[in-house]
Image (cartoon, coloured by chain):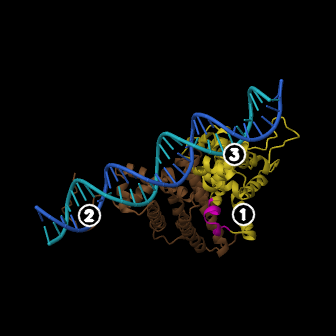
Chain colours: A brown, B yellow, C blue, D cyan
Amino acid sequence: MPPAANAANSAEARQSLTADAWAEAALDAIANGGLDAVAVEPLARRLGVTKGSFYWHFANRDALLRAALARWEQAETDDIVARVGPEADPYTRIVKLFKAANASYRAGRLYLAIAAAEDKPMVQAFVRRVSERRMGYLYDCYHALGFAEDEARDWARFAYATFMGNLQIGRDTPDLMPTGEKFSEYVKLMIKVLIPRATGSAVD
Amino acid sequence: MPPAANAANSAEARQSLTADAWAEAALDAIANGGLDAVAVEPLARRLGVTKGSFYWHFANRDALLRAALARWEQAETDDIVARVGPEADPYTRIVKLFKAANASYRAGRLYLAIAAAEDKPMVQAFVRRVSERRMGYLYDCYHALGFAEDEARDWARFAYATFMGNLQIGRDTPDLMPTGEKFSEYVKLMIKVLIPRATGSAVD
DNA sequence: AGTCTTCCATACGCACGCGTATGGATCAAG
DNA sequence: CTTGATCCATACGCGTGCGTATGGAAGACT
């Protein structure tokens, strides 16, 4: 099966491996085996090629990691905007965030796996940006709900911690995470507790 | 500097390396560089010896990992009993758990690092046991507060998720975690929200 | 038909960690 | 003083992943 790109040739219609394909494969590897699973030779085997391909697209392993993490950051910050979308009501926005947080299994594993390698300075920068942006979004929501700055920060951190913790529980002890109707009730409880709707500004 | 153990010789007064010393060093390595940092040769260098020492105390790297994880499980489950101790009031017990959770920096890093390697089946077993035991303890507290089984389970999971999430935030974005007085207020908020004291049994 | 560029395969040297084999040093026991 | 046990050093082979060097196939261009 030779290429045979008859239409739309120019410069972007290549059916050989692209750098993005490598980056996406790297993200898959991270979601499964952690950051250390981003190894050139195993990835090449998985893609059905050899290292020769890789070192044409990337300078070295670090470049691939950077590309994968950039792709991840892009997707994570897009999710915050895309999934919740044009929603004016801050209450509904937080609710949607909660449901979106427990929606994508892969995204959760990705976040945990990447955050687990915060020792590497390069990774740390990505994790920090994503976390800060997500908590910042929550902060805006709580601020729009009428909370003062410090209170909104506390609530945002609190809610975000609950997000992350539920991700951990779902990954480490999935049998302790309810499913179906019970899960909905669990989410309802957290939403009810984490979004004090009727409260004006009192936290104490 | 020869041994020169003049007093208390018998069989336990050895100043050479013990298996426990290796296990403890392994835990230190985990807290810093993750599970993959448990490598025989680097650990030996750090302890000032060579592999020859290691392979006398352990059969292989897996045995060291098992010993370290067993030590970790022991410490974690001891903490639950020792730190909170003989406390009858379930409310106070949860509060103490909350404060203990954010107390030890190393313990938090250890938990996150070990849990991040839940792919390895051996590690998974340890993580599951520790998590289940901790959440079980929380469940007992909420049950003692008057909640029905399902509700107590939800609250315990909720609170535990908040624990874990705060650990993550403290590790990944420490600048977003308040200190001093602000931290105390943050804890106070979570305690107030996560422990509905006056409630009889109503969750809805 | 010939050249040039794109994309990949093959082959090499290197570093590093695992596990084993073997010897050496030290001390207790006889 | 000799023997045995304890604890560790040294030296080796193996596997595996990284990075480089070089060649080759296949389409594009003239």
Indicate whether residue A118 is drawn in magenta: no
- Mark 3, Cα crowd under 10 Å, few <14 / some 14-19 / many 20+, is many
Name the amino acid type tagged 1: Val
Q: Looking at the image, which is closer to me, A55 or B91?
A: A55
Q: Residue at x 79, y 41 (%)?
A: B14
Quarter occupied by residue C23: top right
* Range drawn in magenta: B168-177
**Which residue is under mark 1?**
B187
Give me the C-alpha separation between circle 2 and circle 3: 56 Å
Q: Looking at the image, which is closer to me, A104 or B179?
A: B179
Q: Are marks 2 and 3 on the same chain?
A: no
Name the amino acid type tagged 2: Ala
Percent coordinates x, y for residue B22 in the rendering: 69, 45
Q: Chain of mark 3?
A: B
Give me the C-alpha separation between circle 1 and circle 3: 36 Å
Q: Residue A13 got which mark? A: 2
Quarter holding the C terminus of chain B is bottom right
Percent coordinates x, y for residue A139 in the rendering: 59, 71
Name the amino acid type tagged 3: Trp
Helix, strand or loop at label 1? It is: helix
Percent coordinates x, y for residue B164 in the rendering: 64, 56
